[in-house]
């Protein structure tokens, strides 16, 4: 606010007051007296009881003059909104509203939130979780006025007014043109809620807004780092928005990502486990979005992970603004977001299609049930893994049975390969006949494995998104949502990190043993040309997993370790208790003797191969 300048009238007024007071002290009477002859002033009769009132009246008149001057100067700069700059609220003050989970501080300047603190959560280094603090976020409406000015609300002063409606706290922030004409931001915070009502409306500004020019709402935020692993948190930090009713889009985690769509109903700045969301009842006509990665070097301690920006146009209705919206500042918790019934569960990356369906309707409810009575989340992961493996054990049995059949048929397949080594067509034809008679097929081992992929991928998406695991320890891991550490390295290994995590090591060992058991049965001693080197893959896969999971959530590594251990146990039982190689061989021999009824597909394939063989013979003649 500009300093008030003392003009000539003010100086004369102060001199007049001083002269009156000196005269009263000298005469100590209430008789009329004249001032000095060279002063052209009226005679004033003053009584003791009138003195304060007269002085106050003079000071009020002087204040009015100063206010008029300040108002004129403010209107010269801000037009109609100059009135707001002359109010007592035109200062760097703020108002705080809070409930039991959320505390918000709203500044007079700009009328937007300058601090948003989640009361029940702390960062990895025990600092309170702030989504907004120290000017990391702005909320601005850019508009033109009928007198040719372009103004931004972030530079103007709002007048706060706090009220109560039952248990709800209401904060009205008004950017005034006069006492009855204003632009208002209205915040309503309810008990126990991360979601607050928010509205933007104007009153009496139809002749102030220039309706021929665009009015834009710009919302920006730089996401604070909250997790131990910068790379892991950054991987799940993204901008999500809903458009055209029920469609949603993720910008992605590249260095710079942009997007644009129409009919925008919400915009979410997701910082892995915490999210800031702006929702509107009446969709914005369109929206443009941008994110930028702020993590330049993962080895350097980083304050911010990503820069978010959204630009949304506002439309006038009858010359006025009138939007009913909501703010959400809280955890990226599937249950909390889903309970609002605003399609906010899509913000949690549970996977697309069948993968998301499995997570939403099977794993999330089941894990919530287990964790409600088991003593720790680590035990809940182990129990859920056991149940999943038991449910999938019939698939594992089918896969292993197919491998056992192929193992029994291996000598006969080798004989066919040797007999028809110079005739690839005949070799393939005889091999298919053998498979058909024996009731075996190499594909029968692959199909059960493919059936397990949706489950594995769904769980791969589930654990990094499970908010319940955040800062929950198990054994040596102090946070199942982040990596565990058994040793710190004095240097950084590319793609691995500067620490050693034990759960990924155990998971890699388990998967190596599992692959040895499964791949070893079908691996050929002499690798056929053109086929992948199975031994190389068997050694490479656990090594890649070791590097890949070293910075991932330890809960995910715990799942894979437990899962592979259980699978190894199930396969050992199947191999030594359930499956008998001699019985399988006897059954195959019995199947060979039975007349085999071919299906249409097999018969057609055999006919095509016979025709191809016949043409090959004719070509040699």
Image (cartoon, rainbow, N blue to C red):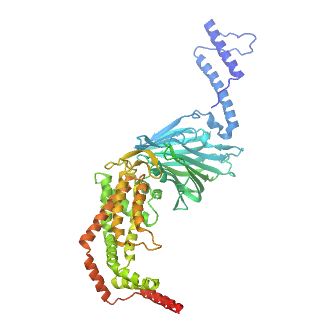
Please, is residue 263 above or below residue 581 in the view?
above
Where residue 50 sits: x, y (%)? 60, 17
Q: Tell me what residue is drawn at x 28 percent, y 80 percent.
A: 585
- Total marks shown come to 0
Q: Is residue 334 visible?
A: no
Residue 176's spot in the image, x, y percent? 61, 40
Q: Where is residue 298 in the image (x, y as percent from the top left)?
A: 49, 47
Residue occupying the far left of the picture: 577
Relative to 291, 449 lies left or right: left
The picture places residue 28, in percent across and down from the top left corner, at 60, 7
Question: Residue 49: in sight, yes or no?
Answer: yes
Find residue 414 and report its image quarter.
Answer: bottom left
> Is residue 513 shown left or right of residue 165?
left
Measured along the vertical axis of the image, is residue 589 above or below residue 475? below
440 with respect to 270 (left or right) = left
In this picture, is 131 found above or below 441?
above
State the image quarter where residue 548 is shown.
bottom left
Q: In which quarter of the image is the N terminus?
A: top right
Is residue 181 rendered to the left or right of residue 186?
right
In this view, the residue in front, 386 or 214, is 386
Q: Which of 288 and 381 is in front in this view?
A: 381
């Amino acid at each position: 606010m500009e300093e008030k300048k003392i003009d000539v009238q003010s100086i004369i007024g102060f001199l007049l007051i001083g002269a009156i007071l000196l005269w009263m002290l000298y005469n100590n009477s209430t008789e009329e007296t004249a001032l000095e002859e060279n002063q052209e002033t009226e005679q004033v009769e003053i009584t003791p009881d009138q003195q304060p009132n007269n002085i106050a009246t003079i000071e009020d008149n002087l204040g009015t003059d100063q206010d008029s001057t300040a108002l004129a100067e403010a209107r010269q700069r801000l037009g109609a909104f100059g009135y707001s700059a002359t109010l007592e609220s035109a200062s760097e003050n703020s108002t705080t509203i809070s409930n039991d989970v959320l505390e918000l501080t709203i500044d007079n300047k700009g009328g937007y939130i300058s601090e948003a603190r989640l009361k029940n959560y702390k960062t990895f280094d025990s600092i309170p979780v702030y989504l907004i603090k120290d000017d990391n976020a702005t909320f601005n409406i850019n508009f033109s006025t009928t007198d040719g000015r372009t103004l931004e609300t972030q530079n103007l002063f709002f007048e706060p007014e706090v009220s109560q409606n039952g248990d709800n706290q209401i904060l009205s922030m008004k950017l005034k043109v006069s006492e009855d004409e204003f632009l208002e931001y209205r915040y309503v915070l309810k008990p126990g809620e991360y979601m607050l009502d928010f509205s933007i409306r104007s009153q009496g500004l139809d002749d102030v807004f220039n309706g021929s020019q665009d009015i834009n709402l710009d919302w920006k935020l730089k996401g604070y780092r909250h997790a131990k692993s910068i790379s892991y948190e950054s991987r799940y930090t993204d901008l999500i928005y809903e458009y055209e009713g029920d469609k949603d889009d993720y910008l992605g985690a590249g260095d710079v990502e942009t997007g644009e769509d129409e009919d925008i109903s919400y915009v979410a700045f997701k910082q892995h486990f915490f999210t800031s969301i702006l929702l509107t009842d009446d969709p914005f006509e369109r929206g443009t979005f941008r994110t930028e990665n702020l993590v330049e070097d993962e080895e350097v301690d980083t304050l911010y992970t990503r820069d978010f920006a959204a630009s949304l146009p506002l439309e006038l209705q009858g010359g006025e603004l009138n939007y009913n919206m909501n703010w959400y500042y809280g955890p990226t918790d599937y249950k909390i977001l889903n309970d609002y019934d605003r399609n906010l569960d899509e913000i949690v990356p549970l996977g697309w299609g069948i993968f998301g369906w499995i997570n939403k309707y099977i794993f999330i409810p089941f894990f919530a049930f287990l964790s409600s009575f088991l003593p720790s989340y680590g035990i809940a992961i182990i129990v859920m893994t056991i149940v999943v493996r038991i449910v999938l054990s019939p698939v594992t049995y089918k896969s292993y049975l197919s491998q056992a059949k192929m193992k029994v048929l291996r000598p006969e397949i080798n004989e066919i390969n040797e007999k028809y080594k110079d005739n690839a067509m005949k070799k393939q034809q005889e091999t298919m006949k053998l498979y058909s008679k024996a009731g075996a097929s190499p594909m029968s081992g692959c199909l059960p494995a493919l059936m397990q992929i949706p489950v594995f991928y769904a769980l791969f998406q589930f654990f990094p998104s499970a908010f319940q695991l955040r800062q929950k320890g198990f054994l040596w891991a102090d946070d199942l949502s982040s990596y565990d550490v058994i040793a710190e390295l004095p240097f950084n290994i590319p793609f691995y990190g500067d620490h050693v995590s034990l759960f990924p090591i155990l998971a890699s060992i388990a998967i190596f043993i599992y692959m040895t058991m499964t791949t070893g049965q079908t691996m050929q001693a002499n690798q056929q040309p053109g086929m992948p080197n199975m031994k190389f893959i068997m050694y490479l896969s656990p090594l890649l997993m070791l590097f890949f999971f070293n910075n991932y959530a330890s809960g995910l590594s715990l799942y894979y370790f437990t899962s592979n251990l259980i699978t190894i146990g199930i396969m050992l039982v199947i191999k030594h208790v359930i499956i008998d190689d001699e019985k399988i061989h006897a059954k195959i021999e019995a199947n060979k003797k039975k007349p085999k009824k071919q299906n249409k597909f097999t018969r057609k394939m055999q006919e095509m191969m016979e025709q191809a063989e016949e043409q090959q013979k004719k070509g040699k003649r």
